Amino acid sequence: MGTNRRFRFTKDDLTAIPPPPSGRRAYVYDTFPRAKGLGLAVTPAGTKTFFLHRRVDGRPERIRIGSFPTLTVEQARKAAITLNAEIDQGGNPQDDRRQKRAEITFGELFAEYLEKHAKPHKKTWRQDEQLFDGKLRGPWGARKVSSISRRDVQSLHVAVGRESGNYRANRLLALISSVFNKGASWGLAKGENPAAGVPRFRERSRERFLQADELPRFFKALGEEPNQAIQDAVLLMLLTGARRNNVLSMRWEDLDLRAGLWHIPDTKSGESHTVPLVPQAVAILEARQPDGSPWVLPTQGRGRTSASGHLAEIKTAWENIRVRAGLPGLRLHDLRRTLGSWQAAQGASLAVIGRSLAHKNVSTTLIYSRLTVDPVRESMERATAAIFAGREADSDSARETENGD
């Protein structure tokens, strides 16, 4: 068979074309009138590929259509007709395809987002990374950004809501939207944000805190924790109302035990915060004593080692504590809410509670700024005294039962 042969394509004729000699390709062209430029390339390995040969923007282009026989002659002709119409109207399909091939994937866009935006500006960037790894890398990591549609976002949002709950699904939706918004501002994502307009699930506000009848079980289970550092960490979260990460990374240099103060240089809101230390918290800290480590809770026992050497994760121990206490739904963050709730029960104002927990609320910022540490300390001491009173009352009751009273 010679090269550049022209004939009206049929399946049988194309199937019968033998591979050309090694190192060469054979080209044949269809004479179907409306499919101008339609051809078939045959490699020495026997691979056969439809293409369109046309001059586009003044230069010859060979535009791939698809493989034969996966693509039929009729399908190849329809594709050729469509491409010809686009070219005749001034378009350049080859340029469009080159741009498509050069377009970044969602995984690449997220990497840009993480380095350029999340890490420099978000304290929760590791949560974004975990969310991407757990829910987005698999289905979307290798996909081109433009291929992700609103329907894709909706489907994933629903699936994650079903698997992991409304809260996590909504955080995922917010992350997707943020990634696409940043991508658009950097010129890496074009068109409408596919997350725009996707409704979020309703979230029930979390109101869990330790009730009076739960305190004895909680303290008993906590006392059975063999790792003293973890036991102290949990108690400090309850007694200070501070967030987990702040407690776990507590430094001796930020403590003034004589004055009963803990200065947190960097909180979630991006601002520093001074926490009054109630007597029970001071007692815990005095018992620990610095051992050469800058950290109050250096890594030991079952806590996973962090890069800096302080206690980094206590999930397993916490799970054991709450199961022993019969409180499977209790979260570490609920300890912070517990302090605020018991402050409210002792008559503290919302302003005092907000100040003690370092809540950043625009409507009460001016009120917070006028508060000194003294009323906050008094409120926290009343609340923790009430909490520990519940613990001691239960202990007295247990002793009376043992003595037969």
Image: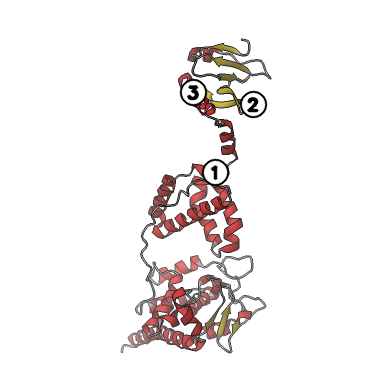
Residue at left 48%, top 80%?
366
> Label 3 to label 1, Cα distance in Å?
31 Å
Instruction: Find disc 2 in the rendering and name its residue.
Output: 59
Give the number of the mark in front: 3 or 1. 3
Instruction: Estimate how packed mark 2 is, as few (under 14), some (14 to 19) or many (20 or more) residues with alpha carbons within 10 Å.
Output: few
The answer to whether residue 221 shows anywhere in this view is no
Mark seen at residue 338: none
Instruction: Estimate how packed mark 1 is, as few (under 14), some (14 to 19) or many (20 or more) residues with alpha carbons within 10 Å.
Output: some
Give the number of the mark in front: 2 or 3. 2
Q: Is residue 143 above or below residue 276?
A: above
Which type of secondary structure does the marked residue at label 3 adopt? helix
Q: Amino acid at mark 1?
A: Ala
The answer to whether residue 314 shows anywhere in this view is yes
Whether pointer 3 and pointer 1 mark residues with C-beta atoms closer than 8 Å, the reply is no
Mark seen at residue 81: 3
Residue 370 location in percent, x, y? Answer: 49, 85
Q: Is residue 68 above or below residue 189?
A: above
Which type of secondary structure does the marked residue at label 2 adopt? strand
Q: Earlier in the sequence, mark 3 or mark 1?
A: 3
Classify the position of the N terminus by image quarter: top right
